Amino acid sequence: MSINLSLVVIVSSVIAQSEDAQFPFRAEATKVVKDLTDEVAASTLLHHPFLQCFATGGYVDMNLATHEFALNHYAYSRNFLKYLQSVKDKLAKASPEDVHLLSENMKEEMGNYEEEDLKTLEEHGVRRDLVDKKAHAKLIRHFLDTVGVKSEDFENTNTIGAVFTRDILKMYDEANACEALAIIGFAIEQTVASLYQFIWDGLKSHTTMNPDDFVFFPLHILVDDGHADHLKNAFHALYSRDKEQCKNAPSVVRAVLDRRSQMLTDLKAHIETLSGGKVCEGTTSPAH
């Protein structure tokens, strides 16, 4: 029995040494993931006056504010699967063993959920038949139709959302695999649940819309927040092996967060102009 125990100790030691050799920067990667996660949570983006004004019904015309948010936000988000595929392609070249970590995100984008997820949604008033096996693209298209945003509206390349999209696409194109993972994992996906909570609050409390028409938002708040974890895990694995490729990732994340905040600043001013100059001040402290 003592021999077997000794063998277990030896094998475990060999495995540990092998993993240390394969992931020499694991401890540093863990710290970077934590620091970036905390920085994103405290960012100006997630406490932006636009979001706080929307959540509290602070715009003089909430129907107008909803329409303009939908038009400009979706100009970017409608191509999410393309962005995710682009990141996946970069990762396949740099670290093919980690590509599987992105697959769950693509699966849920098509409306495939576990029973536990569907029960969680039902507990919050979202009927399963509204979301189960329904691709996210179909759910957001229903919301857009409800608020009067047409497909041809996205042909305008000069909207706030269109200009923002071009800037973000350029950042993706110029990023290496690790930086692209950081963009989509920290600066995009981590923000989804918090950002959409503001929108959901505003739609529920300050519009006359039927909740069935905006299930896209509680779906992403209550279920899809695991997306960021999958992407962060891929980032962590790549950083653990290739620190040099990831050295600029934090600054790239900050640049994307700043650009997203600027978009919301521009959108807020645009809505206020369309509303006759009525300004919503928002607040300076987190609402969530």
Image: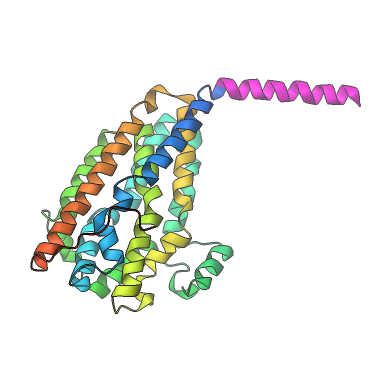
Q: Position of residue 94 (x, y in %)?
A: 41, 30
Q: Position of residue 217 (x, y in %)?
A: 38, 64
On whether residue 15 falls in the magenta region, the answer is yes
The residue furthest right is: 1
On whether residue 154 falls in the magenta region, the answer is no
Q: What residue is at 38 percent from the left and 76 percent from the top? A: 212
Quadrant of residue 137 within the rendered picture: bottom left
Quadrant of residue 211 within the rendered picture: bottom left
Q: Position of residue 21 (x, y in %)?
A: 57, 20
Q: Is residue 128 left or right of residue 81?
A: right
Q: Is residue 224 left or right of residue 256?
A: right
Magenta stretch in the rendered image = 1-21
Residue 179 appears in the figure: yes
Magenta span: predominant SS is helix
Q: What residue is at 46 percent from the left and 67 percent from the top? A: 133
Is 121 in front, or is 264?
Answer: 264
Q: What residue is at 21 percent from the left and 73 percent from the top? A: 63
**Quarter holding the N terminus?**
top right
Q: Position of residue 70 (x, y in %)?
A: 24, 64
Is 184 in front, or is 99?
Answer: 184
**Quarter holding the C terminus?**
bottom left
- Number of numbered tags placed on the structure image: 0
Q: What residue is at 35 percent from the left and 71 percent from the top? A: 214
Q: In this rendering, is residue 211 above or below 65?
A: below
Q: In this rendering, is residue 2 above or below 102?
A: above
